[in-house]
Image (spheres, coloured by chain):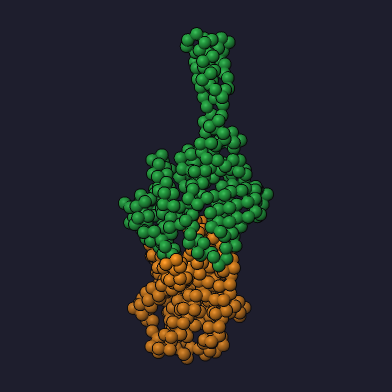
């Protein structure tokens, strides 16, 4: 679906993308996870044909997005794009604008089914400017999927959502995947990547640090556990591959209850923060 | 089934959406349609003289207002609104779809034309009812009127799209575009009798389309006897058509060449 090799892009002195490789397979949800300014949006905008790359090779659905030439319209016909916040189309009604966009495509989805899928059926006759932030974002998704795309780009789709809206959104994305859509998602929410993605690429400062499944990210499944307890001279701890053995040893040593026993494994968040160099939002 | 829809069909759909969008912006509608009427009321009340036998200033002024309407609804409106659309992400969103850019331009032109038809109908109706406006009766004059309206819409739209690349963003657009239009109106004989303007002003105006549109509209709304009082002692219909077409081509060239989907 997507093949990227050695992609770079700079704006003046600022290097947004510093040489990344990606291979995204048909049918998967692939997340680009990283802090703001890591190069996620630039990467997506190059893949979606909005900007040319400085160097490297890019193939999306078999075409270079920058030079697709005559294939342009039929290429776009197979792609759906949900970019970061837009504030357009305020004076149209929800159904009106979704129906209008459906006319651009060769084989669009059913307008009312798409509106239903994004949960805007009750709002279908409301003006877009009357929608809440979350509803507007769901309209963005409706406009992105109305053309029945094989490949969908979602750039930070749930920024600013309340938890309930995010859950509803995630279930919509899973439905799209179940329908065979390949999805490239960018997010700076770790739980979103963990929840949705088949594979995650962690990106920071324009470089990909690791590509993995969420479960294996940063060697989480094999990371050492830390056992800590209150020793005679204060808090003590030991890292181990086998915490059970440590606990058994301590139990013998204390002959019973181990004071203030805690066993921790690094959370995905710990690993992620370490990967991106401790940068916070 | 797998073919994307045609450019013209999508252009018509865009036109429909542009008209819906415009008609829901009530302030813009009222301003666009009634501003020429208000100006007619002011100028018609101030200048009560005739400027030639049987030609009132109101009669002269209506021709100028219709020509100005083409520049306001086309050039000015579009050159201000496209940067705003860019700010809001509307054009970027469209660019991510299979919609051809030509359809987007066609949609703009259709909405300008529709707005002009409404403006002209209201201006003429009020002119006839309250300001003693005489309507031309010869079919040939209405034929001239029709091609002027179509060619004027097309060139004004194309130049508006081309000029929309000049403002950096939506906030600054009006300040850059509006003075251009106001100066052109003064130079082109909209508010004053053209031949009474200084010679250099007339020569500058003759480069731009508005002078030719106003002169063309005078050939529709003024008696043919008035042609003798024009600069060339004639309506210069052929020349008007050629100059408008040249501007249309220039506008299209730059519109396609410089069109941006987001602000710098």
Between residues B36 and B260, which one lies in front from this camera angle?
A: B260
| Residue A207 position within the rendered picture, expressed as x and y whole percent measured from the top left | 62, 44
In the picture, residue A105 is in which quadrant?
A: bottom left
- Chain B, colour shown: orange
Q: Is B134 placed left or right of B229 in the picture?
A: left
As drawn, B158 above or below A272: below
Between residues A99 and B84, which one lies in front from this camera angle?
A: A99
Q: Quadrant of the C terminus of chain A?
A: top right
In the picture, residue B138 is in which quadrant?
A: bottom left
Between residues A163 and B119, which one lies in front from this camera angle?
A: A163
| Residue B115 position within the rendered picture, expressed as x and y whole percent measured from the top left | 41, 71
In the picture, residue A37 is in which quadrant?
A: top right
Question: Residue at 48% across / 59% down in the picture?
Answer: A78
Question: Residue at 56% across / 26% down in the picture?
Answer: A224
Residue B229 visible at all: no
- Chain A, colour shown: green
Question: Residue at 59% across / 59% down in the picture?
Answer: A64
């Amino acid at each position: 679906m997507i093949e990227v090799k050695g992609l770079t892009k700079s704006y003046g002195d600022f290097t947004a993308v510093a040489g990344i490789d990606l291979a995204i397979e048909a049918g998967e949800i692939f997340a680009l996870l990283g802090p703001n300014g890591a190069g996620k949006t630039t990467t997506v905008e190059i893949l979606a044909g909005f900007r040319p790359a400085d160097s490297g090779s890019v193939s999306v659905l078999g075409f270079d997005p920058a030079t697709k030439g005559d294939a342009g319209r039929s290429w776009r016909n197979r792609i759906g794009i949900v970019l970061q916040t837009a504030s357009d189309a305020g004076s149209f009604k929800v159904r009106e604008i979704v129906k209008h966009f459906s006319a651009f495509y060769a084989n669009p989805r059913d307008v009312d089914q798409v509106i239903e899928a994004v949960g805007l059926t009750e709002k279908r006759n409301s003006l877009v400017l009357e929608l809440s932030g979350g509803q507007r974002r769901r309209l963005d998704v409706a406009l992105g999927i109305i053309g029945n795309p094989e490949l969908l780009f979602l750039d930070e789709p749930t920024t600013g959502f309340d938890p309930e809206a995010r859950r509803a959104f995630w279930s919509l994305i899973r439905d799209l995947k179940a329908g065979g859509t390949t999805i490239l998602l960018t997010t700076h929410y770790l739980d979103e990547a963990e929840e949705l993605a088949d594979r995650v690429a962690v990106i920071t400062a324009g470089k990909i640090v690791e590509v993995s499944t969420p479960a294996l990210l940063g060697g989480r499944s094999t990371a050492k556990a830390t056992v800590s307890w209150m020793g005679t001279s204060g808090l003590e701890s030991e890292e181990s591959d086998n915490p059970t053995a440590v606990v058994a040893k301590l139990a013998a040593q204390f002959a019973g209850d181990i004071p203030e026993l805690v066993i921790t494994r690094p959370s995905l968040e710990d690993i992620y923060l370490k990967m991106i160099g401790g940068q916070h939002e | 089934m797998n073919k994307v829809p045609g450019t013209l069909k999508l252009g018509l759909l865009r036109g429909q959406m542009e008209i819906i969008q415009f008609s829901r912006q009530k302030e813009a509608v009222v301003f666009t349609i009634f501003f020429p009427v208000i100006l007619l009321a002011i100028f018609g009340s101030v200048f009560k003289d005739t400027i030639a036998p049987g030609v009132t200033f109101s009669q002269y002024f209506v021709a100028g207002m219709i020509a100005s309407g083409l520049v306001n609804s086309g050039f000015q409106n579009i050159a201000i609104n496209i940067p705003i659309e860019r700010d809001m992400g509307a054009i970027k969103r469209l660019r991510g779809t299979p919609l051809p850019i030509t359809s987007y331009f066609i949609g703009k032109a259709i909405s300008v034309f529709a707005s002009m038809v409404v403006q002209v109908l209201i201006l003429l109706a009020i002119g006839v009812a309250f300001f003693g406006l005489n309507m031309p009766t010869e079919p040939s004059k209405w034929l001239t009127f029709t091609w002027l309206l179509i060619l004027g819409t097309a060139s004004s739209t194309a130049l508006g799209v081309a000029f929309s690349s000049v403002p950096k963003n939506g906030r600054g657009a009006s300040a850059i575009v509006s003075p251009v239009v106001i100066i052109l109106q003064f130079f082109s004989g909209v508010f004053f009798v053209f031949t009474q303007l200084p010679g250099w002003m007339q020569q500058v105006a003759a480069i731009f389309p508005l002078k030719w549109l106003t002169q063309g509209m005078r050939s529709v709304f003024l008696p043919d006897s008035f042609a003798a009082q024009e600069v060339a002692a004639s309506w210069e219909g052929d020349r008007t058509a050629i100059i408008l077409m040249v501007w249309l081509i220039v506008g299209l060239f730059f519109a396609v060449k410089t069109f941006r989907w987001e602000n710098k």
